[in-house]
Amino acid sequence: MSSFAVMPAFTLIQYFFYLAINWNLPIAIHIIWNEFRGEKKYGINTTGSDQLHSLKKKGIDTSHATIYMPAGYDMLETIFTEIKKFNLNHFLDVGCGKGRAMCVAAHYNFVKLTGIDFSGSLCESASINLQKTQAIFPAIRYTVVNNDAFYYHLPSDADCIFMFNPFDEMIMSGVIENIEISLEKYPRNLCVIYLNPVYKNLFLDRGFKQVYHLQKLKYLEACILQKEMTSP
């Protein structure tokens, strides 16, 4: 029995109403159908949203974070099909949540996977889902780090960074600074997969180029940004 089969039905219903209220009905129907399809296809349990109230109760500052909301499976599948042409190796999910993007990335030939999230409970869920994915793809190597992205030093070989609008402009600026420091120290070509790219201009202002753009139902948007570096 798949993990999706035992997922409480109210999780999907609750998520549907959240989407319908905060977005609109067509998007809610579109996303929920893909949740149903994707969770069953990939055998993981990542559906739902989280306002991060549990972190607030622990005294953790969530003022710069957005709620947990996983990227749609159809968006991921389209963008991962496109990213294949860049021959990337190390997938880094900044704000990995329950690990959905990392698990789907494994189905698109990524073997080295790293995720970072400041929620310990979400990191635990990500590890569980990645264990299920590793049972399908034994060769994958994954690491899940419970840390604040603002202070996180990128792995020297990370060449594909994924983000689903995980935080506000201040934190995003710090993450971009960390990316540039890493590229200066370890020159390499790097792609950023950015869903709901609210702060895309911050990347463009730092010399990244948009090499792919995707938009569905007006509000569902993703892009691939690339920065090419010449080794000394």
Image: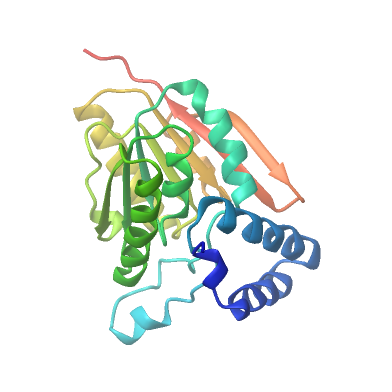
Question: Is 44 positioned to the left or the right of 90 in the image?
Answer: right
Q: Residue at x 30, y 35 (%)?
A: 158
The image position of residue 61, as x and y in percent, is 32, 75
Question: Is 51 positioned to the left or the right of 178 in the image?
Answer: right
Q: Is residue 69 above or below residue 37?
A: below
Query: Looking at the image, what colour scheme do you see?
Result: rainbow
The image position of residue 73, as x and y in percent, is 60, 50
Front one among 52 and 208? 52
Count up the numbered dots: 0
> Which residue is at the far front?
1
The image position of residue 193, as x and y in percent, is 49, 39
Report if residue 171 is visible in the image: yes
Q: Residue at x 46, y 28 (%)?
A: 226
Quarter of the image where the C terminus is located: top left
Front one among 53 and 182? 53
Q: Is residue 90 above or below residue 76?
A: above
The image position of residue 172, as x and y in percent, is 40, 52
Front one among 37 and 62? 37
Q: Is residue 1 above or below residue 77?
A: below
Q: Residue 105 is drawn in which quadrant?
A: top left
Report if residue 95 is visible in the image: no
Q: Is residue 2 above or below residue 182?
A: below
Question: Is 155 positioned to the left or the right of 71 in the image?
Answer: left
Q: Residue at x 28, y 84 (%)?
A: 58
> Which residue is at the far right?
26
Question: Is 186 positioned to the left or the right of 84 in the image?
Answer: left
